[in-house]
């Protein structure tokens, strides 16, 4: 697991693409791609950082997040 500066393990988020990006803004499709999601129902596990949280917020209508 990734470690934070204090030596604690970083929290992970599991992000799953639930809806297609077709018909939505192209920047949202690029954000989904930047998260590492490739197809519907594909899941990735990423560190809980402000950058990742911002990307999730931008496409919150397309993804599902669990801790």
Image: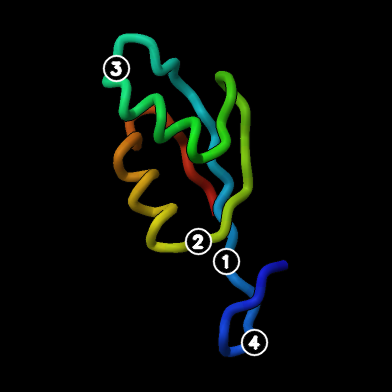
- Observer-side mark, 3 or 1, equals 3
The reply to whether dot 1 and dot 2 touch (C-beta < 8 Å) is: yes
The percent position of residue 12, horizontal first and vertical second, equals 59, 59
Marks 1 and 2, how far apart at CA: 5 Å
Which residue was labeled with disc 3? 24
Q: Which numbered dot is residue 7?
A: 4
Asked which quadrant contains residue 16, the reply is top right
Which residue was labeled with disc 2? 48
Does 65 sit above or below residue 62? below
Marks 3 and 1, how far apart at CA: 30 Å
Tell me which label, 3 or 1, sits earlier in the chain. Answer: 1
- Observer-side mark, 4 or 1, equals 4
Q: Residue at x 56, y 59 (%)?
A: 47
The secondary structure type at the circle numbered 3 is loop
Which residue was labeled with disc 1? 11
Q: Residue at x 51, y 28 (%)?
A: 17
Q: Is residue 48 left or right of residue 2?
A: left
Q: Is residue 51 left or right of residue 12?
A: left
The percent position of residue 27, horizontal first and vertical second, equals 31, 28
Tell me which label, 4 or 3, sits earlier in the chain. Answer: 4
Q: Residues within 10 Å of mark 3 (few under 14, many from 20)?
A: few
Which residue is outermost to the top?
23
The secondary structure type at the circle numbered 4 is loop
Q: Residues within 10 Å of mark 2 (few under 14, many from 20)?
A: some
Marks 4 and 3, how far apart at CA: 40 Å
The secondary structure type at the circle numbered 1 is loop
Which residue is outermost to the right?
1
Q: Is residue 60 left or right of residue 38?
A: left
Instruction: Give the quarter of the figure containing the C terminus.
Output: bottom right
């Amino acid at each position: 697991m990734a470690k934070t500066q204090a030596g604690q393990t970083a929290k992970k988020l599991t992000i799953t693409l639930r809806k297609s990006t077709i018909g939505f803004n192209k920047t949202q499709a690029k954000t989904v791609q930047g998260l590492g999601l490739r197809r519907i129902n594909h899941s990735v596990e990423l560190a809980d950082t402000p950058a990742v949280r911002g990307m999730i917020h931008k496409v919150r209508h397309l993804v599902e997040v669990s801790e």
